[in-house]
Image: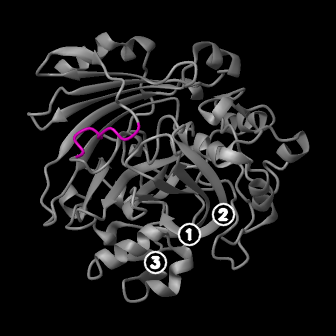
């Protein structure tokens, strides 16, 4: 893979065996943050061709008339499609496509297409996140084996990454506000496009992201975040609930998880809610660690930082987020409605994860594409144990500018073997994400899980 610049070349040259390297960078290197690098570590400058503009701060003002609780108006609604990539011409653009995207053109030659729009580097975060990111750059480290980290809080831990493991940790703890409640839908359409909607309520309390949190507090409590999810419909699944306590150092303490089943009417410990265990109500179309494109312990893989590429990825997906669009308009046979999907050219970090010889997982190899401006995984290519491309993931993100933070509005997982897909995060007919919610530790105790399941 051709590297884009010397910054990436340096990072890759410092990668060591098993993808683990010393994370702390010298103060003079960290001083580049906010100068030639953005405050979170992306290249601030435009690309040589001018097709990716310079980062100038992202979205920093809320559109006129917007108020929290509204669906987010599209700041770029006036943009026109620059080009459309189809099965008949995708070979012309293959250097800017993932292997998974190419496979989708081959799998659905008559219907899958990519509408390419002008690129807007809209990602932005609060100033205190930028400040803490700069501090993290000179102090954050991976724990032994990379299965956790230390000396980091609030901001991105490794804005100038030296290994693939550091990049995946940037994604795991990326800023999405301090707490959020969301009502979302999930579908697993059959080949003809028919589907049953599963609705969830989720609550996420990001202990790591709390303003004023310091690394010492995090290490003492050994907690990254609390997550609670329960099914609200259909009736046959309603009340099924999941609780996760995600630890910072998973060598000290692996993830803690509990489930509540309405049939049994009791909370049970669930140590298997990890790795390649089936996702909730996912009809076998994603694993537990596919959620959020990747979550959980990274210890079963060797992580290799390959460098950067310019790739067409879903971005500024306000059409998919719109309250004027219905689920039936989004969910189509084979894939979601391509007329509602916006792709832009962005620089991405590329990381390859290969299954360690002494471990097991359904996926032998995974390739991740991280948006340089947000550390959000934008796309994934996943291979089975016969080295065959199996699943293709794409995350459709928007800037939730009341926070502000760039985060997904819809994650889609394509299963090439079954010819089906899973779409998670449908919110068009639900309440908008609530980033002002007040949550406490008591909301994430096993007793609270039982109460949530009975609602």
Could you tell me which secondary element the residue under label 3 belongs to? loop
Whole-Å distance between the Cαs marked 1 and 3? Answer: 19 Å
Asked if residue 310 is positioned above or below residue 185 in the image, the reply reads: below
Could you tell me which secondary element the residue under label 2 belongs to? strand
What label sits on residue 80 in the rendered view? 3
Please state the extent of the stretch shown in magenta in the rendering. 275-282
Residue at the far front in the pictured view: 358
Left or right of 253? Residue 125 is right
Left or right of 212? Residue 285 is left
| Mark 1 or 3: the one toward you | 1
Quarter occupied by residue 383: bottom left
Spot occupied by residue 236 in the image (x, y as percentages of width and height): 8, 34
Q: Residue at x 48, y 60 (%)?
A: 316
Left or right of 289? Residue 426 is left
Q: Which residue is mark 2?
A: 308
Quarter occupied by residue 148: top right
Could you tell me which secondary element the residue under label 1 belongs to? strand
């Amino acid at each position: 893979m051709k590297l884009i610049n010397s910054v990436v070349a340096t990072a890759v040259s410092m990668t060591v065996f098993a993808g683990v390297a010393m994370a702390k960078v010298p103060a003079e290197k960290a001083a580049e943050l906010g100068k030639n690098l953005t405050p979170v570590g992306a290249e601030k400058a435009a690309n040589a061709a001018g097709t990716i503009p310079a980062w100038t701060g992202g979205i920093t003002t809320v559109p006129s008339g917007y108020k929290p609780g509204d669906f987010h108006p599209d700041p770029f609604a006036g943009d026109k499609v620059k080009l459309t990539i189809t099965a008949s011409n995708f070979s012309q653009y293959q250097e800017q496509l993932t292997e998974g995207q190419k496979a989708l053109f081959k799998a659905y030659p008559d219907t899958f297409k990519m509408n390419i729009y002008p690129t807007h580097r809209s990602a932005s975060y609060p100033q205190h996140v930028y400040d803490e990111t700069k501090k993290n750059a000179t102090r954050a480290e991976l724990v032994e084996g990379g299965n956790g980290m230390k000396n980091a809080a609030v901001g991105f831990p490794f804005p100038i990454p030296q290994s693939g493991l550091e990049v995946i940790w940037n994604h795991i703890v990326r800023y999405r506000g301090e707490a959020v409640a969301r009502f979302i839908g999930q579908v697993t359409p059959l080949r003809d496009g028919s589907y049953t909607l599963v609705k969830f309520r989720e609550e996420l309390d990001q202990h790591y992201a709390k303003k004023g949190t310091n690394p010492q507090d995090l290490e003492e409590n050994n907690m990254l975040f609390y997550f609670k999810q329960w099914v609200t419909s259909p009736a046959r699944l309603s009340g099924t609930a999941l609780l996760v306590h995600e630890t910072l150092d998973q060598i000290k303490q692996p993830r803690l998880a509990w489930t509540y089943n309405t049939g049994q009417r009791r909370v049970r410990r669930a140590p298997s809610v990890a790795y390649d265990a089936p996702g909730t109500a996912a009809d076998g179309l994603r694993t537990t660690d596919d959620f959020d494109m990747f979550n959980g312990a990274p210890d079963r893989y060797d992580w290799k930082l390959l460098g950067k590429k310019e790739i067409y990825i879903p971005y500024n997906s306000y059409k998919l987020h719109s309250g004027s669009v219905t689920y039936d308009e989004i969910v189509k046979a084979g894939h979601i409605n391509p007329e509602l999907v916006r792709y832009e050219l962005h620089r991405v970090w590329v990381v390859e994860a290969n299954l360690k010889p002494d471990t097991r997982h359904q996926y032998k190899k995974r390739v991740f594409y991280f948006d340089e401006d947000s550390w959000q995984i934008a796309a994934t290519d996943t291979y089975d144990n016969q080295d065959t491309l199996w699943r293709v993931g794409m995350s459709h993100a928007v800037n939730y500018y009341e926070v502000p933070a760039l985060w997904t509005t819809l994650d889609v997982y394509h299963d090439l073997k079954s010819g089906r897909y899973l779409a998670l995060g449908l919110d068009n007919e639900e309440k908008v994400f609530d980033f002002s919610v007040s949550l406490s530790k008591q909301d994430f105790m096993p007793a609270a899980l039982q109460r949530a399941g009975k609602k």
